[in-house]
Amino acid sequence: IAGITQAPTSQILAAGRRMTLRCTQDMRHNAMYWYRQDLGLGLRLIHYSNTAGTTGKGEVPDGYSVSRANTDDFPLTLASAVPSQTSVYFCASSDSVTDTQYFGPGTRLTVL
Amino acid sequence: AQSVAQPEDQVNVAEGNPLTVKCTYSVSGNPYLFWYVQYPNRGLQFLLKYITGDNLVKGSYGFEAEFNKSQTSFHLKKPSALVSDSALYFCAVRGNYGGSQGNLIFGKGTKLSVKP
């Protein structure tokens, strides 16, 4: 693994179903983030984690939850998916030394 | 509130011509500014950043950006555009949403189209 990986690459999901998007980084970065990208809106922060064991809410957290059991993994869970959660989801990580965020390849989620 | 504006949805340039993608920001305090590029069906790739120091920042693939504090701008530039530069470009400023260490606040993106 090099950088950030996300799984799955894409998913079609029925409304009401539970879904977990996976994110793993191998750069030992302390901070991790989840963004969603919607046409015309850019990227918006869903949740963040400054370090393992801590998480916080971003700009659009409703309907999503996260956990950070260790440094490398930062899964995003949709407890009961709704069509408005159709989007492309990006995971990112950063360290305080470079102040630069690095992004995963994204997960394209469609909720029907 | 912190924000970033990219006033152009799309920029069209001919190959070999200089290009500029505009960005203005609104933050309290000193800004940390970034440019990212996104190719179709790909994640965001870091191009360059301004934290402090020289106002002209050089980045990947021949891109540069100029920080202008008085105009609160951070325009992305390249002296000679390539067809392969065609992509979606995002300007971002580092925020601190809630207790976040440094989330990014993004503009809405500018689609750059370079024609042969």
Image (spheres, coloured by chain):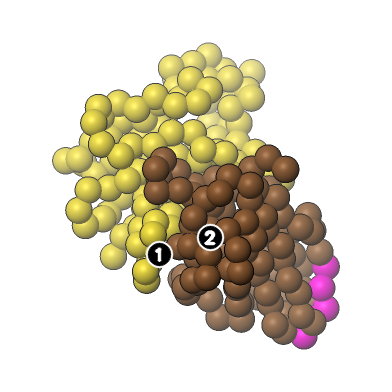
- Is residue B8 visible in the rendered image? The answer is no
Identify the residue position indicated by label 1 in the image: B100
Q: Horizontal and vertical percent for residue B15?
A: 57, 18
Between A54 and A11, the one nearer to me in the picture: A54
Q: What stretch is highlighted in magenta?
A: A12-16
- From the image, give the main secondary structure of the stretch colored magenta: loop
Tell me the quadrant of the picture where the N terminus of chain B can be found. bottom left
Chain label for disc 2 = A
Does A112 sit left or right of A94 as displayed?
A: right
Which residue shows up at 22% across the image and 48% down it? Answer: B30
Does B83 sit left or right of A54 as displayed?
A: right
The answer to whether B72 is drawn above or below residue A58 in the figure is above
- Dividing the picture into quadrants, the one containing residue B51 is top left
Identify the residue position indicated by label 2 in the image: A33
Between A52 and B51, the one nearer to me in the picture: A52
Which residue shows up at 72% across the image and 66% down it? Answer: A21
Does B72 sit left or right of A53 as displayed?
A: left
| The color chain A is rendered in | brown
Tell me the quadrant of the picture where the C terminus of chain B can be found. top right
